[in-house]
Amino acid sequence: MASIFTRIVNGEIPCHKVAETEDYLAFLDIRPQAKGHTLCIPKKEVDYIFDLEDDHLSGLMVFAKQVAHAVKAVVPCKRIGIAVVGLEVPHAHVHLIPLNNVSDLSFKEPLDVASEELAALAVQIAGKL
């Protein structure tokens, strides 16, 4: 069965898309740790990030770097943190999370953000790419 991220890639489930290339997709997390929390994924479904081919892993990181700069241009923060957890969805992905404090990267209580606000934020971030 396809992962939820593959279903997003295939257009079966909507997302608040931030950026897309032939191989990668970035979209806002619907259960964000901070405003602007973005997920970067390879379109090819691979469960564990370190099982990606070297060129796809490095490509994902370069893609995430570009997206991180766009997020930082829109969301006031000190840094964009990066996290690879890989337990919640069996599809390699990178979390980009705007940070002002170390405690902002907790993965405990997600923010409650309306879909309309996520949609507007995705447009703003995409405009910086």
Image: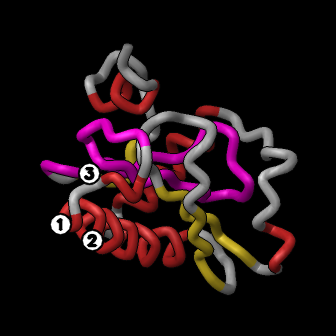
Q: Is 2 covered by the magenta stretch? A: no
- In the image: residue 66, left or right of residue 86: left
Dot 1: few (<14), some (14–19), or many (≥20) neighbours within 10 Å? few
Whether the residues at callouts 2 and 1 have beta carbons within 8 Å, the answer is yes
What mark, if any, has residue 30 been given in the picture? none
> Can residue 128 be seen here?
no
Residue identified by numbered label 3: 24
Residue identified by numbered label 1: 55
Front-most of 50 and 18? Answer: 50
Dot 2: few (<14), some (14–19), or many (≥20) neighbours within 10 Å? few
- In the image: residue 86, left or right of residue 68: right
Residue 58: x and y in percent read: 27, 71
Q: What are the residue bounds of the magenta stretch?
A: 22-47
- Which image quadrant: the N terminus? top left
The residue located at (26%, 51%) in the rendering is 24
Front-most of 81 and 127? Answer: 81
Locate residue 76: give its quadrant: bottom right
The furthest residue to the bottom: 78
The furthest residue to the front: 51
Prevailing secondary structure of the magenta residues: loop
Residue 29: x and y in percent read: 58, 44
- In the image: residue 80, left or right of residue 5: right
Report the amino acid beneath label 3.
Tyr
The residue located at (44%, 61%) in the rendering is 125
User: Of label 1 and label 3, which has the lower sequence position?
Assistant: 3
Residue identified by numbered label 2: 58
